[in-house]
Amino acid sequence: MSIDIIFKIAAIGILVTVLNQILIRSGREEQAMMVTLAGVVVVLMMVITMINNLFTAVKTIFQLY
Amino acid sequence: MEIIQIVAIGIICVIILSLFRENFEDVAIIISLSASILIFFIIIPKISNIITVLNTIADKSGINSIYVKTILKIIGVAYIAELGVQISNDADEKNIATKIELAGKIIIIFLSLPIIIALVDTIVSILP
């Protein structure tokens, strides 16, 4: 739960953007779409665990059962 | 102090977001969501201290603990709903934002029903 998660997400985002451009320039649009999807899925998985921690924390603090 | 940490995270996220705003919108939304989650995790110990002090004051002054619990629940629901509304507004999804807001309000009204009933009872009992 520190800032390196944000750096990881940003790194994955930049990587996917670059790969996307390379694949599009080289004429492989489908693979570019695949790379974009894979990137978003990886980032989403990381964020889902954070959201889960957030909701459990709020539940315990505010006794929201 | 935590405030320095919080502001640092905020500024870093704004800079990273400005990088992602034009060409890669969905990662930008995820980064703003993760930034808000990180900032919330920093202030969690402070919130729990406030809540324990609130409970002790309520117990000392003899207020019925149900009222304090309901207030805490309402604050929790309001915070989560606000998070959802801000994230969906950030992604220009006005429709979802209004739906979440509506649901949040209804849940808060629902949570405050017992207090309203108790209030009405006391008023009726006071009247001659």
Image (cartoon, rainbow, N blue to C red):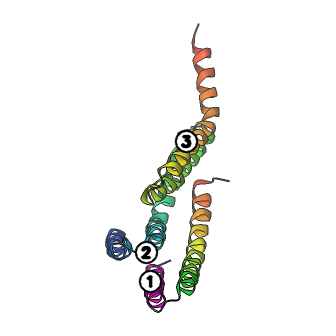
Residue at 33 percent of width and 72 percent of height: B18
Say if labels 3 and 2 share a chain: yes
Query: Residue B2: percent from the left, percent from the top?
Result: 36, 70
Q: CA distance from mark 1 to mark 2?
A: 7 Å
Check if residue A19 falls in the magenta segment.
Answer: yes
Query: What secondary structure is marked by label 1?
Result: helix
Residue type marked 1: Thr
Which residue in the structure is indicated by mark 2?
B24
Badge 1: residue crowd in 10 Å (few <14, some 14–19, many ≥20): some
Query: What secondary structure is marked by label 2?
Result: loop
Q: CA distance from mark 1 to mark 3?
A: 37 Å
Say if labels 1 and 2 share a chain: no
Which residue in the structure is indicated by mark 3?
B102
In this picture, is B15 found above or below B60?
A: below
Residue A17's tag is 1
Query: Residue B5: percent from the left, percent from the top?
Result: 35, 74
- Please identify the quarter of the rendering in which residue B107 is found: top right
Relative to B94, B119 lies left or right: right
Which numbered disc flags the more N-terminal residue, 3 or 2?
Answer: 2
Whether label 1 touches label 3, CB < 8 Å: no
Relative to A8, B12 lies left or right: left
